[in-house]
Structures are given as C-alpha cells and as structure tokens.
Amino acid sequence: MTKPYDVIIVGAGVVGNAIARELSRYQINVAVLEKELDVGLGTSSRNSGVVHSGIHYKPGSMRAKVNVQGNDMMGDLCRDLKVKIQYIGKLTVAQDDTDIETLHALKEQGEANGVPGLEILDKDQMQKIQAGVGGIQALYSPTTGIICPYGLTVALAENAVANGVDFHLGEEVKAITKTNNHFEVETSPGRLFKAQVLINSAGLFADNICRMAGINEYRIYPCRGEYLILDKRLEGSLSTLVYPAPRKGGAGLGIHLTNTVDGNILIGPSNEYIDESDDYACTADVIKLLKKEGHELLPGLSTSDFIRNFSGLRSKQTSPEEKGFKDFVIESRRDLPGFINLVGIESPGLTSSPAIALMVKDMVGETLSLKEKGSFVAERKGLTGFFHELPPEEKADLIAEDPDYGEIICRCEQITKKEILDAIQNPLGSKTINGIKYRARAMMGRCQGGFCLPRIVQILEKEFGYRPDDFLLSNPGSNLFTGHVR
C-alpha cells in the first residue's frame, strides 16, 4: 500500500492535468495515475491544437458551457504557464446555399452561448482576412485560437508537481474497490493506492474505469483522425484558421487547414471509427485523400512540403451507426459517493480543460474540505517559447550565464543543448525520446530527427549513463537499440 491520498485522478491527459493543477491550490494530497511513461501521450498530444470559440454546441449543453468559459480562461492560464497561444480567428466557409444556412445557424447558436464578435462575411470581406480562400460566404469567429497541445499538457502537469501533486507514471489501473469511505485502486505493477475521492479522467479508456467501478451505462467508440504536417516553408500562408461548414452526421468538423504556434500547417483530420482505443495507425488511402485536399486548399504545395503524418483518436459516445455528437459527461455519482466521472470528453476538451477543472474542484469540495494553500505558485519557471525566438541581447545574456545555450543540437528547429538538458531533467522524471521531443521540440523539423537524434542519444549515454536498452521511444517495449555494433 502506498501512502494514502485524499484524491486520485486516473489519466494524465490535458483534462486530468488541469484538474491536478487546480486541486494543487488546496491543502489536500493529490495523486495522478497514468498508464503511459509520460503525460499526454494520447489524445492530448494528437489533435489540431485549436482553442475553439464555442459556436458548434447546443446552447445550454455542458460542451457549450465549458468551451466558452475555457476559451475565456486560456489566455491567462497560458501566460502563467509560459505556453504559447495565439488568437488568430477562424473562417467557417460555405460553398453552397445549404452551407449558408448552416453558417447563420452557427452564428445564432454561438451568440446564444456567449461567443463574442461573430460575423457573416461576403467574398470580399473573406479575402481581406485570408487571401485566396474559396467559398461564397464565411462565419468569422475572432476568439478562435491556436496552442501547442502537448506543451499545455506538460506545463499543467509540471506546475501541479511544483505545487505538491504526485504523478505515478507507468501505473495502469487494473481494479477498483470501494471500502467504507475510501477507494482502493490496484495498478499493473501490483501497487495499491487509496483515496477518498476518485476522478475518472481516462479519456479513451474512461468506460473501462467506469466498469471497474461498477458503472456500466457508458461506452467509448474510438474514432481516428489522421493529419499531415507541412513544412515551415509555408509559414505565413494562412493568417487565420479555415474550416468547411460542418455537414450533418459527421464525426468531426471536416478536413481543414490549421496553423500551429510553431509555424507548421496541419491538414486534417479525417474521421474513421476503429475497434481499438490505442490504434494510432496512419493509412495510405487517407494520406492520399489528405494530400489531394491539401493541393485544393493550397495549390502551391509540392510533394516535398509534406514532412510527416500522425493520427489521433476521439473518445466518442456515439456509435458508427449513430454518428454525430453527445454531450460531455461530467458528474459526481450519487450512487457511488466520492466517484467523479468524466466520459466522452472529445473536442473541445482541450479548450474546455480549465473550466472542467473548476467544475470538478467544486465536486471534490462536496466531499473534502478545501482550504487554500498560502504557498501555491501559479507561474511556471522557464522560457515562454524557445531560445531561438528571443531577441539577440537576451540570447547573449543567457549564453554568458550557461554556454549550453550556445550549442545547437537540433538544426531544423534551432534547439540548443540547454533546452535538451532541461527536457531530459524534467520535473516528472520522464526519460523517453518522445518525452524529450514534446518538451524541447527537437526531432520535429524537416529531417525528423536525422541530425539531432544521434546527438541526443550521445548526451543521454555520456552525461546520464544510458545503456542501449534504456532508450525507449515512448512505452515499455519501444526500445531503440539492442546493443553496440562496435
């Protein structure tokens, strides 16, 4: 038995980490259990990174409420956590009269939800915002933004750790038992955790956690979306996000172009229901479709502009036959006191995460006495963004303080040795290659690690004593090496 906790959160995605950080304000013991060897390796790092405005959800629904509130909170949160965010707006584009009706319905719905600044634009007005955009009309939502999704997820976790939350990585939940006023949670390494409050924030596996707790009314249907990443040569091609008007019955919002805060453009996502909740495969047919869509949306694309593809999974409550969307489930179970349940938190879960955290905090307060800490630190240490983005004088000062800032390890992304070292020595203790990648952005450039990965391996080997079998891409069994050739 490990030390007893007041609260256990299952799942270290963006929502679980936002809850952990919010609860770290109070004089309670909080733990997060995550089956992976790092935070945010599922849906939270595999999405468009869009901060949604709140136009797509039915007025009065949970999704609409937490989306609009989360959008309003996100700017201040990112300032405190030193996470890059840009509110660049979005054009939702109509191609025919049916789409125009959809735009007006979205505008009316968004205004009912409290989304500010919505406008229907004609062709000329659209061109002033985004030259060359197709379509006959568009709905403009100025509060739509972009953010680094894995950057936010990691930052929330690291700030929670700094404020006393314990993260237990590589701990897959296998059984849950309610004993008197406590939950006992058994994990795959054979450890037993105990807490008065148990929060299910397991995302794609939330229905599994429900069943372990004796709740059988929910089922998650994984729906895969594939993306293509475009080279930074195209940075500046988009000044705003461009989405098609959504069509009835779709599982997502359609294939679209999305800027990222780091200068790439994403094409996607597709949508395809699949059987397994961890199937992140990319498929030849979908990649071919995305390339075709990309050429139509950006005619100047060349084959060499496609530098990588990836996929993410939506945790849908609607079946392949039903399609569409269901509302978020955010509930404090009266039939299982102390069990707080989050199910079906798909898009806009990233945007909604700080608002969901506030709701869950209030639910925790129904069971536990929440007294604020005087020692809570809201701001995260470190740089906002990356060293190469700083003014020359600041770079010179940092190099003078630490010469490791003067050595470039990743040429494509201009990432320094100091940034690599900081990523390796992260507060969560994650030691995977993907953990370094998501924190430092190394291996994300045009060569996809061809230049920097051998240098990162050398740093890990010489400065941290890594042996060949210590190098993992992300999960147990994802070994990079078996030994030395000489």
Image (cartoon, rainbow, N blue to C red):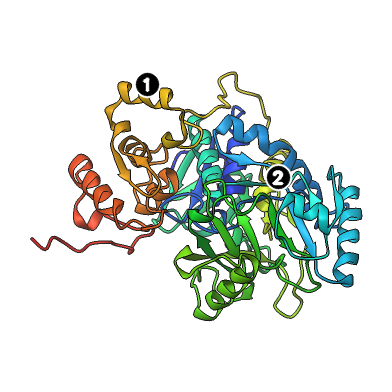
Q: Nearer the viewer, residue 10 or 134?
A: 134
Quarter of the figure with the C terminus = bottom left
Residue at x-position 46% and y-position 28% = 391
Which part of the image, by quadrant, shows the N terminus?
Answer: top left
Location of residue 309 in the rendering, given as x and y in whole percent from the top left corner:
49, 66
**Residue indicated by mark 2:** 356
Examine the rendering and report whether any part of residue 483 can be seen: yes
Residue at 91% across, 49% down: 112
403, 340: nearer the viewer:
403
Mark 1 vs 2, N-terminal side: 2
Task: Tell me if 117 is positioned left or right of 474 in this view.
Answer: right
Q: Residue placed at 69% from the left, 61% from the top?
A: 344
Query: Tag 1, which secondary structure?
Result: helix
Q: Secondary structure at mark 2?
A: helix
The answer to whether residue 486 is left or right of residue 414 is left
Alpha-carbon neighbours of circle 2 within 10 Å: few (<14), some, or many (≥20)?
many
The residue type indicated by label 2 comes to Ile
The quarter of the picture where residue 195 lies is: top right
Q: Would you call the spot at circle 1 few (<14 residues within 10 Å), some (14-19), or many (20 or more)?
A: few
Q: Is residue 3 above or below residue 238?
A: above
Residue located beneath label 1 in the image? 397
Q: Which mark is residue 178?
A: none
Residue type, label 1:
Asp
